């Protein structure tokens, strides 16, 4: 066994469920995972080599090819609309290689889905360091500097970011861009105040306060938080877990990135309160790979919490209240935002969704009762415990109480994070961010809805138009079908785990049909086919598959004229098949002139 892997196993633990950590540590040290190391890891964990390889193949960021540096350029909608194509061409030119290749200098260039920087696009991740607001000129500056052997921090072309981004632990050009504060983002919260109040009450009283508040999960599903904790606490088994879902993979969403940056202490405190309420001793932050630049920042916050006795044994002097938190990095898979997929990933497996029931609160991590909550949810708990459930209900609407953090990006002069009360209309939101000439808003990311002007009077709330936080604004200059809907479909195709035929195959057939229409070969029956095929994805196992056709179904419903414009009025049938083109290459090889 190599000294590298031996040291990693000592640090991480020689357990199958830590396979992801082991692979990530090897790759961080050597830039790739070699065949030899795969063999050693498999033998050490009593796995087959196929087990290790099939796990690696599921995630975007593992590599079996060595490289000196790896560049991942975001190819999301926002990146492309803000000049991403020119930035991509600049990278390919200066690197002298195409996307997906490693150049002669050992620099790999790849594209990847949204990296949580939609408010400062185009952005790239180079060896884990974020380079936002790229231009072709900045690309040339960075790559030339890398070739000269300069450190990445010496190649910063912008000042350090606002807030805590400029601190030594983060040291990044990323900006938090907090535009509007509220109950969570204001500066009136005192660290430790909520936890002190919580441990003076019984566990059931804490759950009761959260239930009274009406707080619902802020990750998108909106399940009542107090009820989830109650179910988890009452589930059989003394061993329970708290998991923070920080796998913020929905394109256009970046509010959790900002919370992790500016309010990390509140997050840790919220997780600790949850642990007290359900009786958990271990907590895990599942952090998306794209946020690895935050590692030291979060580890520092954990260390401080332990020093202050807010983590560890007998927390704040409460006998028997023992709880600690560790970070679990993902390796690049959107589907791991779904709680059961996340748990599978944490157990060192492919992040494929589990069948439900049982639910994680019954059998989650290691088949023990597990409460999985979003970053924003845990932070909201702190304010609720501090001020009370009834206080929290004063905000928002009767059915949707409290506030919501929105990640707003696109065609507006002030992209960033806004904390609003539930009940704001889309018109009011556009006015708030200064957007004009708006054609559409994508609410809730690709899995949400594309809303046109006739829907701008709708309210942002659970009873009308709900969102996990992503709000993408498109003005009249944008081609919604080609630039937005098609991109979203490609995203879902790429991110599908492949388990369900409805998700694996239907999305590709829908994409092919849409491309046919974009290329001018559409007929009226194609629109009906798209509507019908979109319904097939609803039988998929998880939320990703069930919402994978939403870009099609919502855009057809709200922008029918855009689809009608792609229909050939004089044709009822067009296969888009050109026989002459299909046989051209073969005829050239045999020197034959086709005779039709």
Image (cartoon, rainbow, N blue to C red):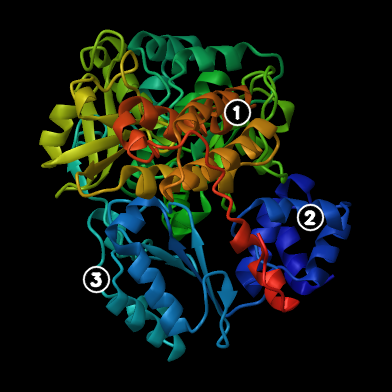
Q: Secondary structure at mark 1?
A: loop
Q: Mark 1 or mark 3, which is nearer to you?
A: 1
Q: Tell me: 142 left or right of 579.
A: left
Label pair 2/3, CB-CB below 8 angstroms: no
Badge 1 is on which residue?
A: 542
Q: Is residue 251 among what the camera can see?
A: yes
Badge 3 is on which residue?
A: 158
Badge 2 is on which residue?
A: 52
Label pair 1/3, CB-CB below 8 angstroms: no
Q: Quadrant of the N terminus?
A: bottom right
Residue 101 percent across, percent down from the top left: 58, 74
Q: Earlier in the sequence, mark 1 or mark 2?
A: 2
Q: Earlier in the sequence, mark 1 or mark 3?
A: 3
Q: Tell me: 574 left or right of 23.
A: left
Q: Mark 1 or mark 2, which is nearer to you?
A: 1
- Give residue 8's quadrant in the image: bottom right
Q: Quadrant of the C terminus?
A: bottom right
Q: CA distance from mark 1 to mark 2?
A: 24 Å
- Give residue 336's quadrant in the image: top right
For residue 280, above or below residue 591: above
- For the residue pair 187 and 432, the one nearer the viewer reads as 432
Q: Is residue 307 among what the camera can see?
A: no
Q: Secondary structure at mark 3?
A: loop
Mark 2, other Cα within 10 Å: few <14 / some 14–19 / many ≥20:
many
Residue 484 percent across, percent down from the top left: 37, 45
Q: Secondary structure at mark 2?
A: helix
- For the residue pair 247 and 535, the one nearer the viewer reads as 535
For residue 244, above or below residue 207: below
Q: CA distance from mark 2 to mark 3?
A: 40 Å
């Amino acid at each position: 066994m190599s000294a590298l892997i031996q040291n990693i196993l000592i640090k991480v633990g020689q357990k199958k469920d830590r396979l992801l950590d082991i692979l990530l540590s090897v790759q961080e040290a050597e830039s790739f995972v070699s065949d030899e190391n795969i063999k050693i890891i498999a033998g050490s964990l009593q796995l087959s080599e196929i087990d290790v390889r099939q796990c690696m193949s599921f995630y975007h960021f593992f590599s079996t090819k060595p490289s000196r540096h790896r560049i991942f350029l975001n190819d999301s909608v926002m990146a492309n609309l803000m000049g991403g194509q020119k930035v991509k061409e600049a990278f390919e030119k200066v690197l002298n290689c195409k996307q997906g290749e490693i150049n002669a200098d050992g620099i790999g260039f790849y594209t990847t889905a949204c990296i949580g920087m939609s408010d400062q696009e185009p952005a790239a991740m180079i060896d884990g360091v974020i380079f936002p607001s790229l231009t072709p000129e900045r690309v040339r500056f960075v790559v030339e500097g890398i070739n000269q052997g300069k450190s990445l921090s010496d190649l910063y072309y912008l000042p350090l970011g606002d807030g805590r981004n400029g601190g030594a632990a983060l040291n990044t050009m990323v900006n938090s861009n907090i535009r509007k504060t509220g109950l969570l983002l204001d500066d009136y919260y005192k660290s430790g105040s909520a936890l002190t109040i919580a441990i003076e009450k019984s566990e059931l009283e804490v759950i009761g306060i959260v239930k009274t508040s009406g707080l619902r999960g802020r990750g998108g599903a909106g399940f009542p938080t107090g009820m989830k904790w109650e179910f988890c606490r009452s589930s059989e088994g003394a061993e329970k877990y708290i998991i923070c879902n920080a796998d913020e993979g929905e394109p256009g969403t970046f509010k959790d990135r900002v919370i992790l940056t500016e309010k990390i202490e509140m997050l840790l405190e919220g997780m600790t309160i949850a642990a007290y309420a359900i009786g958990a001793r271990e907590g895990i932050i599942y952090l998306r790979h794209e946020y690895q630049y935050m590692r030291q920042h979060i580890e520092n916050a954990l260390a401080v919490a332990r020093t202050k006795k807010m983590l560890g044994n007998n927390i704040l002097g409460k006998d028997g209240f023992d709880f600690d938190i560790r970070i679990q990095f993902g390796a690049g898979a959107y589907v791991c935002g779904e709680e059961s997929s996340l748990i599978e990933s944490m157990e060192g497996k492919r992040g494929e969704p589990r069948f439900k029931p049982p639910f994680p609160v019954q059998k989650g991590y290691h088949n023990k009762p597990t409460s999985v909550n979003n970053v924003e949810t845990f932070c909201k708990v702190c304010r609720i415990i501090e001020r009370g459930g009834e206080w929290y209900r004063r905000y928002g609407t009767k059915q949707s109480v409290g506030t919501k953090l929105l990640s707003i990006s696109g065609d507006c002069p002030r992209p960033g994070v806004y904390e609003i009360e539930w009940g704001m209309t889309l018109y009011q939101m556009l006015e708030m961010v200064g957007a004009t000439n708006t054609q559409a808003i994508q609410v809730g990311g690709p899995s949400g809805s594309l809303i046109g002007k006739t829907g701008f009077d709708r309210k942002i709330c659970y009873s009308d138009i709900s969102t996990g936080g992503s709000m993408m604004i498109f003005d009249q200059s944008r081609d919604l079908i080609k630039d937005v809907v098609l991109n979203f479909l490609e995203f879902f195709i790429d991110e599908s785990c492949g388990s369900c035929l409805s998700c694996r195959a239907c999305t590709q057939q829908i994409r092919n049909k849409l491309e046919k229409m974009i290329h001018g070969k559409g007929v009226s029956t194609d629109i009906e086919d798209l509507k019908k095929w979109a319904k097939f994805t609803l039988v998929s196992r998880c939320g990703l598959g069930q919402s994978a056709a939403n870009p099609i179904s919502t855009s057809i419903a709200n922008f029918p004229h855009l689809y009608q414009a792609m229909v050939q009025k004089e044709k009822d049938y067009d296969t888009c098949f050109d026989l002459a083109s299909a046989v051209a290459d073969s005829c050239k090889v045999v020197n034959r002139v086709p005779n039709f």
